[in-house]
Image (cartoon, helix red, strand yellow):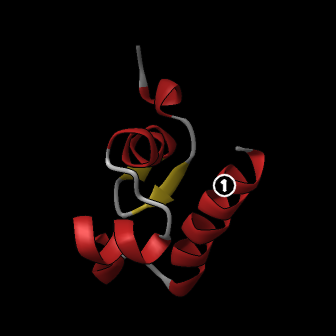
Amino acid sequence: SDATDLGRDFGAGLTEAELRWFTTHEFATTAEDVLWRRTKLGLRMTVAQRQAVQDWLAQRREAA
């Protein structure tokens, strides 16, 4: 188990593994939900990083 197991790093310490956890256990569906309601990571992320989170979540919803 190492950092590569966590998947993509979206910035501000948020990883793909954490996003998967938020969607499967916390039922988060939007970047706003993860970055502003459940955490305050949006304060430390760039606009591009926040958009990457939103894009990843949208792609996950489409695949479901």
- 4 vs 59, left or right, is left
Residue 51 appears in the picture as rendered? yes
Considering every residue shown, the one lying at the far top of the view is 1
Location of residue 13 with respect to 12 vertically, above or below:
above
Local crowd size for mark 1, using a 10 Å CA cut-off: few (<14), some (14–19), many (≥20): few
Residue 39 appears in the picture as rendered? no
Q: Position of residue 60 (x, y in %)?
A: 66, 50
Q: Residue at x 45, y 48 (%)?
A: 23
Q: Position of residue 10 (x, y in %)?
A: 51, 58
- 41 vs 17, left or right, is left
Towards the viewer: 1 or 42: 42
Q: Residue at x 39, y 43 (%)?
A: 18
Q: Residue at x 49, y 62 (%)?
A: 29
Location of residue 63 with respect to 39 vertically, above or below:
above
For the residue labelled by badge 1, is the local secondary structure a helix, a strand or a loop?
Answer: helix
Q: Quadrant of residue 17?
A: top left
Count the marks: how many?
1
Q: Position of residue 58 (x, y in %)?
A: 67, 63
Q: Quadrant of the N terminus?
A: top left
Q: Amino acid at mark 1?
A: Arg
Q: Position of residue 38 (x, y in %)?
A: 24, 65
Q: On the image, numbered disc 1 is attached to which residue? A: 61
Q: Quadrant of the C terminus?
A: top right
Q: Residue at x 60, y 80 (%)?
A: 48
